[in-house]
Image (spheres, helix red, strand yellow):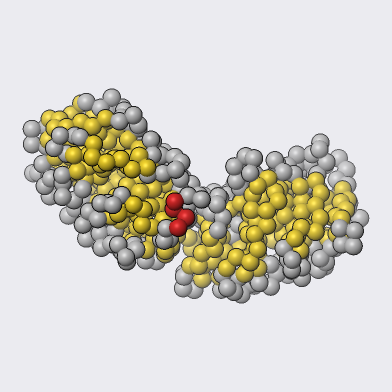
Amino acid sequence: MSAEDDVPRLELLSTIGFNGLVNGGLIIHPDKEHMVYPLGNTVIVRNLNTNKQDFLTGHTNTVSCLVVSKSGKYIASGQVTHMGFKAAIMVWDYEKRCLKYQLILHKVKVEALAFSPNELYLVSLGGQDDNSVVVWNLQTAEAVCGSPAAVQSAGTTFTVKYASNSDDLFVTAGDGTLRVWELDLPNRKIRPQECNLGQLKRIVKCVEVDENDEYFYCGTTSGDILKINMKTKFVANHGPAKGKFSQGIADIKILKNGNLLIGAGDGTLALVNGRSDKYCVIKQGDCKLKGAVSSIALRGQGHQFFVGTNKSQIYRFNLTDFKEDLVMSAHYQPVLDVAFPLCTSDLVATCSGDDIRVWHTCTSRELLRISVPNMICHAIEFMPDGHSLISAWNDGKIRVFLPESGKVWYVINNAHNSGVTAVAATSDSKRIISGGGEGQVRVWDLTINPLNQKLREAMKEHKSSVTCIKVGDKNKQCVSASSDGTCIIWDLINFSRKQMVMSNTLFQCVCYHPAGFQIITSGTDRKIVYWECYDGNQIRELDGSQSGAINGMDICPSGRQLITGGDDKLIKVWDYNEGMVTHVGQGHSGNITRVKMCPERRYIVSVSRDGAIIVWKYPQSC
């Protein structure tokens, strides 16, 4: 047990994000009022009307599969874990929003899950390192029986689906394998029967069984549909012969009238005539969705349905008009920075890939999106006067945007040769200080007119990229951290070095104590180090993490609390003077890149490499 196990937990308020890489991971609960989906190592239950979120937490790594039972009584989720370890399955009680069972048997990854129609059993499918299928008794939480998922010559098995009426029949499918299994409970066996595909060679990614258990439909990476007779195990038909779905079929849903909803890898969503052998397209969306379709979730009988893509988008459709309505959007690339305006906690900005987004903190609603195609934004900062948002880009430009409209106000071209990696602003909003990939720190004057920026000074001492810049001592000095293992305190009046601290690490973050007499650094050596600004002496060293670098750090205005986050995926609140952890937040499954405290000490916002943004309640005891 680690020292953090006994520390009070941070309260998770809301999340911004959706893991669209989980096939079938977006589900509408049978109560028709809630949406269930994974984000990192958390399962989120979100009210469709109020957007209120409940969190099912307990997984230690990324959720890899998700399923809801027919009545909605249970939710089951599986995870991935590290090589050599076993991956857990969590069975949740939906009404109580609590863990009912934890089932552990599969190695490395749980690939797919399915509940039996009467909720007697749960069948689980292991990943390619496990290659087994196991049936669990939901009354006793014991494994009834298990078997290899496919013959050794076959590839990975990707999906499992229970019959609609029988607790004794289910289907598994994957790369070169398609099997119907029958449960023999008295003998504790499951007996597979191979489906005869004739000359067809297909990789099946999704399966859907009709309501009478007569046929089941398979979506393939080749972009066609296989219809298999459940009794004979022969192919009834397959198609379309022409106009196959580009980049494969990722999900299929059967409507009451027998028609099929098809989601394809190129973002196509189509309604297909399932009663015909030719599988003609009846309706299709006006335009392709952003990203590959990974989930189709029916609401009720399917008059309304939701679609999730691998670019972390969720759309709502009505069957009658078939027009998409974007209901949720999130980052799908690593989030590299987060920033609050100086005087409000209601807005927060994040940057990831080629876009910057401004969110409403309380509701997790996206208010503004700024995109610069084919670029990467490394850092962002609100100007203290609130009139602009400055950003650092890999093409060597500093772009300054108007925070309400998102329009470009001005651009500082050729700010750095090897890309701009860090930015900061003085409290009077008259200067921008930038750091580059070549190691220079540059000061830009905006005194006369922001549109006529002037390079005041370039300070060259770092040998590698600048990772973080903070301004201190009433705009008279700033500190820059670099991956060359140095932090330099610069005099902003004479533009010279005042002090330099060195350590055997790649510095990732640095903060000024609000009193201005100390700086705090951290990086890849997992140490939090306090330094004296006056002479550069080391005052204190703390072990910030048991495993992995510390990438983000922030300090409260009073200087009493310090917040860190890093590769151990934990948010830690520290008592600055005591050097002790007072609270821990666990919810990320990707490495945390940055953490920020809001100006009014209401929220802590953390961002990570898996695209997640998590809002925590600032602990009142601090």
Q: Quadrant of residue 399?
A: top left
With 593 as the anchor, is 265 left or right in this view? right
Q: Residue at image x 55%, y 58%?
A: 58
Indicate left or right for 3 with 377 as reference. Answer: right
In which image quadrant can residue 600 be found?
Answer: bottom left
Instruction: Using the image as rendered, state which of residue 101 and residue 173 is in the foreground.
Output: 101
Residue displayed at 28% across by 24% down:
463
Residue 322 in view in this figure: no
Q: For the point 34% across and 29% down, which residue is it? A: 504
- Above or below residue 317? Residue 217 is above
Q: Is residue 30 above or below residue 101?
A: below
In the image, taking residue 52 as reference, residue 574 lies left or right, namely left
Indicate the position of residue 253 as horizontal and vertical percent values. 69, 61
Q: Position of residue 528 (x, y in %)?
A: 32, 42
Q: Residue at x 81, y 65 (%)?
A: 167
Q: Quadrant of residue 33?
A: bottom right
Residue 405 as seen in the image, left or right of residue 175: left
Residue 45: percent from left, percent from top: 54, 66
Q: Is residue 49 above or below residue 400?
A: below
- Compared to 324, does 444 lie above or below? above
